[in-house]
Amino acid sequence: MKVNIAWRLGSTLGALTVAAAGVLVVANPAAAEDSFSFTYSTLDNGDAVIVAKNNSWGGDAAGTAEWRADPSGSQPGDALTATDVLGDGYGMEAHLSNGRVASTRGQSAPYSVTKTGDLPEGNKYTMKLCIVKGSYEKCSSWVGVHA
């Protein structure tokens, strides 16, 4: 009888361990999706900034997407910039509705990349910021910008 009880106890503990591992595997992606939030800033001249915050890191800014119509200095044309500032393992991708993408994917933070090119003056576009890591992607809402 003692062997039977020990076998049942071992069997039950094994099943509970497998069930608990399954819960952990399911819980991790959901937790990652909920750990980011976005804030938005737009200017009258059409420039815009989207900031991603990693809430599981105390709400620290994780990265930004920035649109600058006709910037000056070393960045000619209309500039889309993605910046990763937090060494949390996630990358930043700035997307413009015309297909332009600036990405820090695969780079160690801090890292910034800018994609430039003149666009027709006055044309309206939208921009979003995506947090990326492997197949994981969480994106902000689209924000209106113009050249």
Image (cartoon, rainbow, N blue to C red):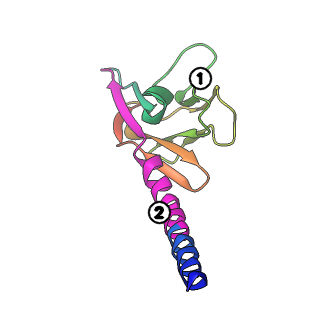
Please say if 11 is above or below 67.
below
Count neighbours of disc 2 (C-alpha within 10 A) and say few if under 14, some if 14 to 19, many if 20 or more: few
In the image, residue 19 lies in the stretch drawn in magenta: yes
Q: Distance between the residues labelled 2 and 1?
A: 51 Å
Which portion, as a residue range, is magenta? 17-44
Q: Where is residue 144 in the image (x, y as percent from the top left)?
A: 33, 36
Q: Nearer the N terminus, badge 2 or badge 1?
A: 2
Secondary structure at numbered mark 2: helix
**The furthest residue to the right:** 107
Q: Quadrant of the C terminus?
A: top left
Please tell me the numbered disc located at residue 23.
Answer: 2
Please tell me the numbered disc located at residue 76.
Answer: 1
Residue 135 appears anywhere in the view: yes
Give the number of the mark in front: 2 or 1: 2
Magenta: main secondary structure equals: helix
Q: What residue type is labelled 1?
A: Pro
